[in-house]
Image (cartoon, rainbow, N blue to C red):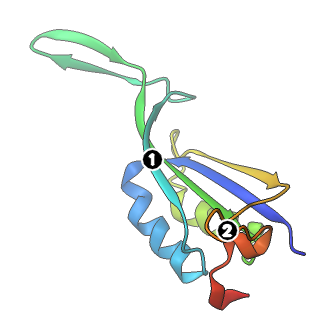
């Protein structure tokens, strides 16, 4: 049985379409995408509105979550870094978790059978 990983990526919203396309090309089809706000090294920015200065310390990001076992996690990380790296603060982070199990609610299948498409087994 192959190991199962959950990968979370926090990054710039403008990179999302390019990342999704690259993931489809390496066989990652299932993902959950959320619009989130956060702060880190960027610490936000200053904006002027009607003559008043505002500190915006929560920066818009996207959070991409996927669970994989058929695609090596190292390959996913390499592809994501190649797409997302601009060399500037705010490129984001990748978090990798090892999962002990996954269960498909509809059928009760567990482990890799729960996350693979029926044609992939």
Question: Which corner quadrant holds the N terminus?
Answer: bottom right
Q: Residue at x 75, y 76 (%)?
A: 113
Quadrant of the rendered structure where residue 75 is?
bottom right
Residue 50 vs residue 74, the one in the foreground:
74
In this rendering, would 116 be left or right of 58? right
In this rendering, would 77 be left or right of 54? right
Q: Position of residue 3 (x, y in %)?
A: 86, 67
* CA distance for labels 1 and 2: 19 Å
- Whether 76 is drawn above or below 99: the answer is below
Q: Residue furthest right?
A: 1
Q: Residue furthest top?
A: 52
- Whether 28 is drawn above or below 10: the answer is below
Identify the residue under disc 2: 76
Residue count near mark 2 (Cα–Cα under 10 Å), binned few <14, some 14–19, many ≥20: some
Quadrant of the rendered structure where residue 44 is?
top left
Q: Comparing marks 1 and 2, which lies closer to the viewer?
A: 1
Question: Which corner quadrant holds the C terminus?
Answer: bottom right
Q: Residue furthest left?
A: 50
Q: Position of residue 97 (x, y in %)?
A: 77, 50
Residue 66 vs residue 109, the one in the foreground:
109
Residue 7 vs residue 18, the one in the foreground:
7
Residue 38 vs residue 117, the one in the foreground:
117
Q: Residue at x 51, y 56 (%)?
A: 32
Q: Position of residue 118 (x, y in %)?
A: 64, 86
Secondary structure under the numbered disc 1 in the rendered image: strand
Quadrant of the rendered structure where residue 120 is?
bottom right
Identify the residue under disc 1: 34
- Whether 65 is drawn above or below 56: the answer is below
- Pick whichever of labels 1 and 2 is earlier in the sequence: 1
């Amino acid at each position: 049985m192959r190991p199962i990983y959950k990968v979370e990526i926090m990054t710039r919203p403008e990179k999302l379409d390019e990342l999704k396309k690259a993931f489809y090309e390496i066989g990652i089809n299932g993902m959950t995408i959320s619009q989130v706000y956060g702060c880190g090294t960027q610490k936000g920015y200053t904006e002027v509105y009607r003559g008043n200065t505002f500190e915006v310390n929560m920066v818009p990001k996207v959070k991409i979550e996927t669970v994989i076992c058929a695609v090596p996690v190292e390959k996913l990380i390499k592809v994501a870094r190649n797409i997302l790296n601009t060399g500037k603060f705010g490129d984001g982070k990748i978090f990798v978790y090892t999962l002990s199990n996954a269960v498909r609610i509809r059928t009760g299948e567990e482990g890799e059978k729960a996350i693979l498409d029926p044609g992939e087994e």
